[in-house]
Image: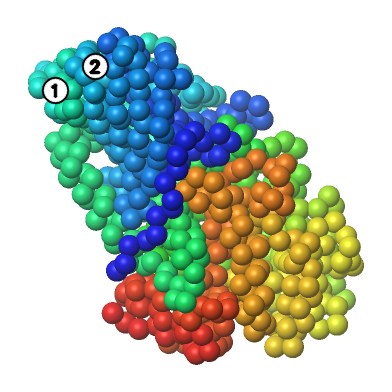
Amino acid sequence: MSAPINPPPVAGAGRRELPAYVSNGVIGLRVRDVPLTTGMTLLSGYSGEHYERQIEAAAVAPYPIAGDLALDGAWLSDVPHQVSDLEQAYDFSAGELTSRFVFRAEGRTAEVEVLTFCSRADPTLVCQEIAVTVDKACSLGLRAIVDARGADGDALKHSRETPGEDPPSTDGTLLWRSAGGLSTCGLAFITTLLGAGEQDPSRPPLRDRQLVSEYGFRARAGRPVRLRQIASLVPRALHDMPDQQAARLAAKAASDGFDKIRAENRAEWDELWKARIHLKGASAQWQGLADAAFFYLNSSVHASSPASTSIFGLATWHDYHYYFGHVMWDIEAFAVPALCLVQPRAAEALLDYRSAMLEGARRNARLMGRRGLQFPWESAPASGQEAAPLPGTAAWHEDHVSLDVARAFTLHADVTGDREFLRTSAWPVLAGVCAWITSRVTRTRGGYAILESMGIAEREAPVSNAAFTNMGAVVVLRDAIRVAEDLGFEADPAWAEIADGMEIPMRGKAVISHDDYRVDEEKGATPDPLMGLFPFSYRLEPDQAKATLELYLGAAEAYVGSPMLSALYGVWAAWLGDRDLALKLLDDGYGQFCVGRFLQTLEYRPDRFPEQPQAGPFFANIGGFLTGLILGFTGLRVGPGGPETWAERTVVLPTGWTSIEIDRLWIKGRPMRLIARHGEMTELQPL
């Protein structure tokens, strides 16, 4: 297994760039260019009332690994302008961020190196090591800080003691309640000082929303001193007394030791990178982009996560706009397909969130006067109920989310071959969504229609027979009929009747976006019918598929640079056999989105939409790119049969690429190797 290509190190302050994003799928951090300065924290399953829109939203949690240092009494936090020579480097192979800077004060110079990572082996742990070397002997102060100043809400309690134990097993614990009292999280931390002899920190009570452990001692010139911080963050979604459980896990971490935790985290990443996507014949730039996409997607999901992830994973920043950490269709449509093959247990955790929230989907359908399951357009992280900002215009007509969720369950069952998952998890979702479809369609003279709906393009007014919605309904209905037969259940006869009679808007041989579609209408270039072809796997006759591809690829210039579907243009061009166009559109639709510190994929292409905030890593774009590499260019169509039946078309790759190879995917519970050579059929070989 070859190591991934790391992004170039970054020198200097971030200016308008997004700070580094460090995550393990349970905890997500924004780490600033001076990493001792407080960044931002999100925690899976932890939510609160949004300060402006007053809806349930992902809440910023206390930052667990802030810090400070002083040279002869001059603290960095008081004189931040005396920091220089900033540099950060990200090791994607292990999820480790290393930051370096120089701090000068009182005639002394300190060279500082900070290592930061979130543990995948122990998913509630955040670890940081601050190494300081001074040029002259001086009084050195070091602080480890849990900082809640940027977190809405309040402290319910804190402690610097361990009941019944002396000395304390941790540096302290904190129970934090989010704004609106919607949820709580617990935090406990430990510190260790190396290279300065035996030192006990001072541990004052919570003050100014901070818990501080402070060390003070005489440092020798040229001899490094290391302060190690380990914090455990636990959401109430995983434990009813999260501060106590965080204390247990932090105490265990102290017993295990920093080095063991780091080694186990690296071992977990070694396992994940066995699924590295090798782009043979492609430029180093494209291999680097594939490695970055793989890293960000996999770092933001975990089998232990109590909730699904949002469209930015567990990342947030001050100028993010309108997603609020909600769970939306983008995850099931773009991220789950790749994760089913690469990290299936994490993919199942994303789907478990939907299973746990079925009652919310059932109530949502009833509120809309329908039967079955209608999943919310913007699902609240903790409650699973509709949380779209008022008045919720998108939630009025965006029906396809339920189809995306149902399709993801079927796909996961087909990839894993897990019949227990098929019976207990996938079938209830499929049956519930199909019951919703029967109450959503309208009988017409020509068959069945879905009126007043919204496709992928969020237009001002709804339309009739949005192509992607109708195509998705047919796919889900046929999936459910097949699964019912497989499990020995009885499918509603109406499902087959609706699937056979569903109106798909056509113009000539091409599928068009909706009834009465005009090319020059608002967002008329949105290629939603192509999304129905791939990755949703709606079947068209070859001449119809060709006409549909040609129609929307011809309008690509008017859409490319927009979020989500842009990343798939390269695959669609390859399906027409145009390798040059595939390479061009892959760059236009994905490569140009990856800018700034550490190749974080942005939501909008910045040169096309300079007015949009730089928001990332954006998982619809990342997931679309990775799903295209694994399933799109390779010509695979996942189904219930063995993997030898999945290759349906000859591999067509962008110009210059000779093959896509993956050393290990998980298929039907077995490790398999993928080899997709241009001009041949893809091979899936058991390991």
Residue 204 versus residue 155: which sits nearer the camera?
A: 204
| Left or right: residue 224 compared with residue 145 | left
User: Which quadrant is home to the C terminus?
Assistant: bottom left
Q: Which residue is mark 2?
A: 140
| Left or right: residue 177 compared with residue 480 | left
| Left or right: residue 619 compared with residue 666 | right
Query: Does the image show residue 589?
Result: yes
Residue 190 spot, x, y in % from top left: 23, 27
**Quarter holding residue 200:** top left
Residue lying at 66% horizontally and 52% vertically, measured from the top left: 605
Residue 247 versus residue 133: which sits nearer the camera?
A: 133
Q: Amino acid at mark 1?
A: Ala
Residue lying at 25% horizontally and 27% vertically, measured from the top left: 132
Q: Which mark is residue 10?
A: none
Secondary structure, mark 2, is strand
Residue 9 versus residue 124: which sits nearer the camera?
A: 9
Residue lying at 40% horizontally and 38% vertically, measured from the top left: 87
Q: Amino acid at mark 2?
A: Leu
**Quarter holding residue 451:** bottom right
Residue lying at 46% horizontally and 66% vertically, measured from the top left: 284
Residue 365 spot, x, y in % from top left: 66, 52
Q: Residues within 10 Å of mark 1 (few under 14, many from 20)?
A: some
Q: Residues within 10 Å of mark 2 (few under 14, many from 20)?
A: many
Q: Which mark is residue 196?
A: 1
